[in-house]
Amino acid sequence: MSSLGESLRTGIAALGQDPASHPRDKYVSYIQLLQRWNKAYNLSGIRDPGRMLTHHVLDSLAVLPYLQGVHCLDVGSGAGLPGLILALARPGTRWVLLDSNGKKVRFLNHCLRELGVGNAEVAQARAESYRAATPFDTIISRALGSLEEFYLSAARLLADGGALLAMKGPAPAAEVTPELSVLAEVETIPLQVPGVEGGRTLVRIRPKGKQSDTARHKAQVTSHKS
């Protein structure tokens, strides 16, 4: 087993997950693909494969226990984080990897082909303009802006009982605005990711009212800012 493979085994076990249940060879192949494309496309500021393992792969896998349902959306997927990694980890789920950047979309489509990912598709659009035929049980983002922006752009895409998951740093409480608290129930979940210093937090957001209420509030906010 390669050193990356052994580090993955140790890191996944440290997350409290069974390394044998994960496609570790595909995680390693993903890191190698990201390294190659990074030279031309600058998809990630992290260059070292060991840090890609901790800060990209293990960071994504840390939220695996909090996924719900089978229809999932990764908003602002970028280099496929966390959605591509989670699709590999949970082949029984269906994923849409959403990003508006053309070079990132090309990389994601290449990864799906090279890694044989049959339970994910790529869509090029911004969250606020994206339309889906089926609502999502889980909508997750690692790269979006504030919690309120995430909610206002994506909550309309949730299925009844669904949740938004925002991956944040150690202290996201300041982002829980009074306006967001009116619209949704917000829960912060501390995460421990092996090799990632400073701490990570998962913020779970569940709408309190109907999606039409969210859409109306978004229109009011947009009108107020213009």
Image: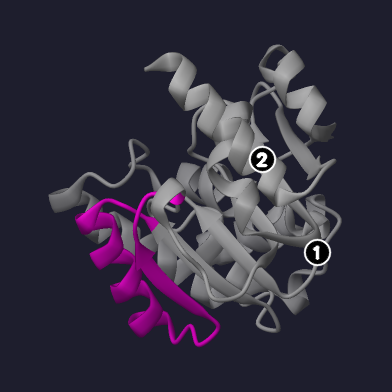
Residue 151 visible in this rendered orientation of the protein: no
Please name the residue shown 50% across and 88% down the image: 118
**Nearer to the camera, 188 or 170:** 188
**Nearer to the camera, 156 or 174:** 156
Query: Is residue 111 magenta-colored?
Result: yes
**On the image, numbered disc 2 is attached to which residue?**
214
In terms of sequence position, does the residue under pointer 1 or pointer 2 come before the other? 1
Which amino acid lies under the numbered mark 1 shown in the image of this protein? Gln
Please name the residue shown 71% across and 19% down the image: 179
**On the image, numbered disc 1 is attached to which residue?**
68
Q: Magenta region: which residues? A: 99-127
Image side of residue 111 versus residue 186, left or right: left
**Label 2: how many Cα within 10 Å (few below 14, some 14–19, many 20+):** many
Horizontal and vertical percent for residue 97?
A: 46, 64
**Label 1: how many Cα within 10 Å (few below 14, some 14–19, many 20+):** some
Please name the residue shown 48% across and 42% down the image: 51
